[in-house]
Image (cartoon, grey):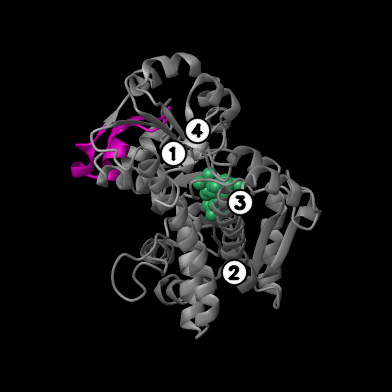
Amino acid sequence: MTVVDLNQQRIDAWNSDNLPIYEPGLDEVVKACRGKNLFFSTDCEAAIRAAQCIFVSVNTPTKKTGLGKGKAADLTYWESAARNIAAWSTSDKIIVEKSTVPVRTAEAIEKVLLRNCPAPGVHFDILSNPEFLAEGTAIDDLTAPDRVLIGGKIENDRGTAACAALVDVYANWVPRERILTANLWSAELSKLTANAMLAQRISSINAISALCECTGADVSQVSFAIGKDSRIGPKFLNASVGFGGSCFQKDILNLAYICECHGLQEVADYWYSVVGMNDYQKTRFVRRVVSAMFNTIRNKKIAMLGFAFKKDTGDTRETPAIDVAAGMIEDGAKIALYDPQVPEEQVRMDMGEEAMKSITCYKNPTDALKDAHAVTIMTEWDEFKTYDWKEIYEVMHKPAFVFDGRNILDHAHLSEIGFIVYALGKPIDPFLKSAEGA
Ligand code: UGA
């Protein structure tokens, strides 16, 4: 397996002791295999020539300009990878779509490959093999996946043979009954649908969390009760300040855009509403913070614990913390940020120079929490649960507030200490009740 990238710095990092991304278990895998059957290189041409099978795993971000801007997937990197593959291939290749792509991308890519390959008689088989692993649990998801999905032109012999070749690769460690084959378009669409359905579950429970706060119901109890229905199941029912990550929003917008392109406006609107609910949840959280703190957070130090879009990753793409921080800064807050994995430069890139005038990043939680008026929990890092909250209470301004955007802390214990606690979808503290509706 040779991993190639044009970026020399990145490849150097993959070849060093400091891998460019943080993922539990990844160091061990890389260290065990690097130099034996795993290589990192910038020599794309040599790797392409030598390969029988090429996984294309380039970025497919949301288009920022032009037709479909803000919704459609930008396939620039995909197309340029395909052009390089075509230019350098001198033997048959199986091309595997690993990147998440719009339905029927394989068709477009095939045209690019066929028309740009100067070598005579070279054949490309295109397969779709969407990736379902999640950050933070990527290695477990890889070694024991729920399923592996391989889409190909199973209606003809060549396509079936290409699928079988990739099935054989996975069968080295995945039981065959978990390796599914499908036609190309089904595989491509399954990826977008899986992410859209997962995000929709979160938006649904987040919608219910708002209703819980109005009615005195507790969203955790509701999640638990409905999750016991085997048709619903218990996973992905944790109310949160909003889903983040590089994929959910991007994939839903892309799915909705494809629907629009096919004239299915109602279907598109249904999926847009999942993103709309996610935005609402973030806005609602900021409103809670401001209204609870007597309608003003101007110049108040607000400790923000966590910036990554979820625990066990340093990834901040589309993290709800960005919008929440921006919302609080708009109201004049001074944010004291601590995340165990996210470096200050990343926060700067996400928030911009202007916002950074109101954000101080700390290397330890103690300094972030000292003299704060409130704490907002943005990421469900386990370490936040282990803090001595009594000690924290002592060093904060009073009344001291905790806004738990992930429902991970022991709220009864915090209230006992003296904190005013807001937890998403939980019965509202009487202190906050008077501020409701703000
Ligand atoms: C997601 C999918 O889960 C993967 O299957 C998929 O392969 C991946 O996108 C992708 O397309 O690359 P990921 O974004 O890494 O994986 O993380 P998730 O665990 O799905 O979490 C996404 C967001 O939803 C996080 O912000 C998380 O905190 C939030 N979430 C998750 C909730 O708010 N509540 C939940 O109950 C679960």
- Determine whether 289 is above or below 247 in the image: above
- In this view, the residue in front, 404 or 265, is 404
Q: Amino acid at mark 2?
A: Leu
Q: Which residue is mark 3?
A: 215
Q: Which mark is residue 189?
A: 2
- What are the residue bounds of the magenta stretch? 333-359
Which numbered disc, 4 or 3, marks the residue that appears first in the sequence?
A: 3
Label 1 C-beta lies within 8 Å of the nearest ligand 1 atom: no
Q: Are marks 4 and 1 in contact (CB under 8 Å)?
A: no
| Three-letter amino acid code at the position of disc 4 | Val
- What numbered label is drawn on residue 421? 4
- Viewer-proximal residue among 334 and 122: 334
| C-alpha separation, residue under disc 4 versus residue under disc 3 | 17 Å
Earlier residue among tags 2 and 1: 2
Query: Around disc 4, counting alpha carbons within 10 Å, would you say few (fewer than 14), some (14 to 19), or many (20 or more)?
Result: many
Which SS class for mark 3? helix
Q: Nearer the viewer, mark 4 or mark 2?
A: 4
Report the residue at 19% width, 42% height from top.
353
Alpha carbon distance from label 4 to label 1 = 22 Å
